[in-house]
Amino acid sequence: MLICFWIASPDLRKHFFAQFIRVKAFDRVVLLPVLLAILLLFFVYSYFYFPVLFDKEPLSVGKAQYIGNQELTTAGEILLLGIIGPFSEEFLFRFFLIVYLPYLALYQTFIKKPLVTKKNVNKSISKPFIFLENVANKVYYRVFEMKDKKLISGWVILVSFFFALVHGPDLYSFPLYILPGILFSFVYLKYGFLASWICHGAANSFSGIVNTIFISFLNGT
């Protein structure tokens, strides 16, 4: 569905390719995202297994979390968890919800000429619409021109909150999903879609290995 949407919209493709790689540096786009993914895994698994130190069960994973499918081969698992799944989620939650949807809502809906406040407004237009247009102009300017960190950070946290919710966590396991969402979002904003895709894919791919390390450590082996 996402690929069909991407193919059907020339404007979306233009923005996607423009943000695919923000920084042309191999270490920032490939190596750093992998390192951040591994550090993230050690942090979230430390939180996940923390109750075990007090003779409790580890936290539960989200109800919508993919935990493996015996019908898939190892290659299929790698393709799904390391490439296809991360691409779909990064496209939806990072590219579309963080950048493209706000751009459509602010620029295409209200703004005809960016950064120019209309002086001669048709009096037949209702005051609420004029108010929304002025707000949209200000928000567009602060986000897409001034790169206001407070507004962007707030939107990133909100989208990451939604990203966590769709995985079906409970109250205690919620940090296991919102923290990766925030990390992937800022990797995307800083280095581009490819970097966040690699970071997400690496986190999924190395998750089992890091989990095995924690289990061995807790079992004293």
Image (cartoon, rainbow, N blue to C red):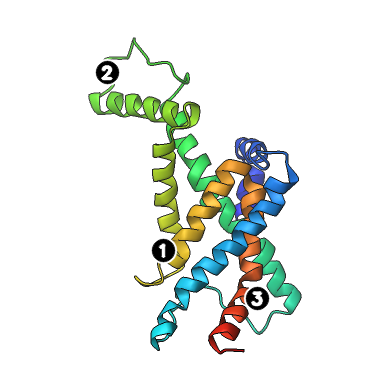
Residue 85 visible from this viewpoint: no
Q: What's the residue at 67%, 49% (across, down)?
A: 194
In the shown orientation, is residue 98 left or right of residue 80?
A: left
The residue that mark 2 highlights is: 124
Residue beneath disc 3: 209
Q: As shown in the figure, which amino acid type bears the numbered disc 2? A: Ser
Q: Please rate how many residues cluster around mark 1, counting C-alpha atoms within 10 Å: few if below 14, some from 14 to 19, many from 20.
A: some
Say which of marks 1 and 2 sits in front: 1
Q: 128 or 54, which lies in front?
A: 54
Can you say whether 156 is above or below 201 in the image? above
Please give the residue where the numbered disc 1 appears in the rendered image. 165
- Residue at figure coordinates x 71%, y 52% from the top left: 30
- x, y percentage for residue 141? 43, 26
Q: Of circles 3 and 2, which is in front?
A: 3
**Are the residues flagged by discs 1 and 3 in contact, CB closer than 8 Å?**
no
Residue at x 45% of width, y 72% of height = 47
For the point 65% across and 58% down, the residue is 35
